[in-house]
Amino acid sequence: QVQLVETGGGLVQPGGSLRLSCAASGFAFVYYDIGWFQQAPGKEREGISYISSDGSSTIYNDRVKGRFTISRDNAKNTVYLQMNSLKPEDTAVYYCAAAFGSIATAWNLSQIYQYWGQGTQITVSS
């Protein structure tokens, strides 16, 4: 059974940090590129960050560049998103998604990902 399970969400004050984890199972994780997406209330799902299957290539949405860091541990079938200097506008549900092969040129298009997690809520508020 294919699963992507996000953990690490919660309530944090502005300026705080969180680390999200995305644990994969049921498919050959090492061959899949991974994207993180966010969906705020009333808005469309938006790509936040991307990492290639071997971890050598990363991409960030300009809104999070310099604040968020994506990484992966293929031995643990897990991708991480370190989120620093969080802002109220980062409040959203965060999803990880997996796409087979190299999808870097279209990483922010949700329709090209085959597998999705259930999402984890992040609320940035004082």
Image: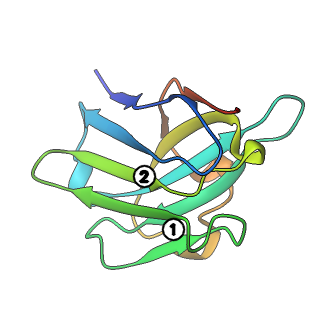
Asked if disc 1 and disc 2 are in contact, CB closer than 8 Å, the reply is no
Q: Furthest residue to the front?
A: 126
**Label 2 Cα neighbours within 10 Å, binned few <14 / some 14-19 / many ≥20:** many
- The tag on residue 71 is none
Q: Residue 3: x and y, percent?
A: 34, 26
Report the side of 27 relative to 109 (left or right): left
* Residue type, numbered disc 1: Ile
Q: Quadrant of residue 61?
A: bottom right
- The image shows residue 44, relative to residue 122, as above or below, that is below
**Label 1 Cα neighbours within 10 Å, binned few <14 / some 14-19 / many ≥20:** many
Which mark sits nearer the N-terminus, 1 or 2? 2
Q: Residue 125: x and y, percent?
A: 70, 33
Residue that badge 1 annotates: 103
125 or 4: nearer the eye? 125
| Colour convention | rainbow
* Residue type, numbered disc 2: Leu
Q: What quarter of the picture does the C terminus occupy? A: top right
Query: Disc 1 and disc 2: Cα gap in Å?
Result: 19 Å
Residue that badge 2 annotates: 81
Q: Who's the residue at 42% across and 54% down the image?
A: 82
Q: Who's the residue at 90% across and 30% down the image?
A: 42
Report the side of 74 relative to 108 (left or right): left
Q: Residue 80: x and y, percent?
A: 35, 50
Q: In which quarter of the image is residue 53?
A: bottom left
Q: Residue 99: x and y, percent?
A: 45, 53
26 or 14: nearer the eye? 14
Q: In which quarter of the image is residue 108?
A: bottom right
Disc 2, SS: strand
Disc 1, SS: loop
Q: Which mark's residue is nearer the viewer, 1 or 2? A: 2
